[in-house]
Amino acid sequence: MNWWERIFNFADYGQLLGLVHNSLIAAAVLGVVGGIVSVFVMQRDMAFAVHGVSELSFAGAAGALLVGASVVAGALVGSILAALAIGLLGARARDRNSAIGVLMPFGLGLGILFLALYEGRASAKFGLLTGQIISVDSPQLGWLIGICLVALGLLVAIWRPLLFDTLDPDVATARGVPGRAMSLLFMLALGLVVSVAVQIVGALLVLALLVTPAASALRVSASPVLVPVLSALFGVLAAVGGILLALGGSLPISPYITSISFLTYLVCRVVGSRKGRVVRMGQ
């Protein structure tokens, strides 16, 4: 098998498609919720925080794998601990980034230690870092959907004060919006979504589903309604499209998801630049 056939080979595609039913559903749900969360990630300048939470989520998942516990539960615990730590320690951007810079290598090192001690299948180890195509069974699917719905419900409940605090934190504080509470609640929602993303795309590349969708949407629109909708659509396109493409090859899922996500960003960047040029010409 040459390198091209390893990337794209759809000989038995129809038979393989039935094996990823749960993964496709999980990816679609994650794409929607991750896309919406990514809007606040971009607006609050917290892309670095996503990576920091993912490293602790990876450590939790690897620890659960080592002791034979639920990987979903391990990833969830790691994500929530990291999210709360960053939310508590990082009132200001400088403090937050310092805390993340300390947590990231610790989480990654801890996760690598757990994987080194794990004597099971190598694919299970590799999947935590780069994602797996067939990794979601029915019980896991229920948990992943439930976690995403809790995160989405939390965001909906605090949407207006969170948006106010995001766009103008000083005025929001003067109007009585509790900035620290908004930060903690948002970090909790982010941690929940990261724990799901690690199961699909792996710990190393969660930025493709929690940063790039909103970065793409913000290139073509500034509407507070259209941006979350576009971001969710871009998230679904990357997650579901990545699985569908990966099914025809023998590579991990993450290169396909990240490639679709990056190409979407490039297209949006071109469209946005042309739109801006047309507006300037009309003025």
Image (cartoon, rainbow, N blue to C red):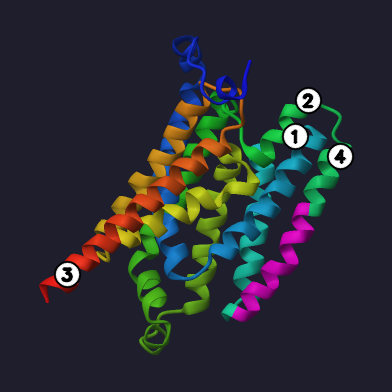
State whether residue 133 is above or below residue 114: above
Marks 1 and 4, the one that precedes in the sequence:
4
Question: Marks 4 and 2, Cα distance to the nearest angstrom?
Answer: 12 Å
Reading the image, the residue beneath label 3 is 279
Q: Which residue is mark 4?
A: 116
Q: Quadrant of the C terminus?
A: bottom left
**Which residue in the protein does label 1 denote?**
125
Residue, far bottom: 174
Nearer the camera: disc 3 or disc 2? 3
Q: Are marks 1 and 4 in contact (CB under 8 Å)?
A: no
Q: Give coordinates of residue 171: x percent, y percent.
A: 37, 87
Looking at the image, residue 278 lies above or below residue 131: below
Q: Residues within 10 Å of mark 4 (few under 14, many from 20)?
A: few
- Earlier-in-chain disc, 4 versus 2: 4
Three-letter amino acid code of the residue under disc 3? Val
Few, some or many residues within 10 Å of mark 3 (<14, 14–19, 20+): few
Does 96 lie within the magenta span? yes
Residue at 82% across, 36% down: 67
Where the N terminus falls, by quadrant?
Answer: top right
Is residue 188 shown left or right of residue 222?
right
Q: Position of residue 232 (x, y in %)?
A: 36, 48
Contact flag, marks 1 and 2 (Cβ < 8 Å): yes
Q: Specify the segment rendered in magenta.
A: 94-108
One can see residue 281 in this view = yes
Badge 2 is on which residue?
121
Residue 164, x across and y down, in percent: 35, 75
Cα–Cα span, label 3 and label 4:
56 Å
The reply, left or right, for residue 80 in relation to residue 217 is right
Q: Which secondary structure dominates the residues rendered in magenta?
A: helix
Which amino acid is tagged 4?
Ala
C-alpha separation, residue under disc 3 versus residue under disc 2: 56 Å
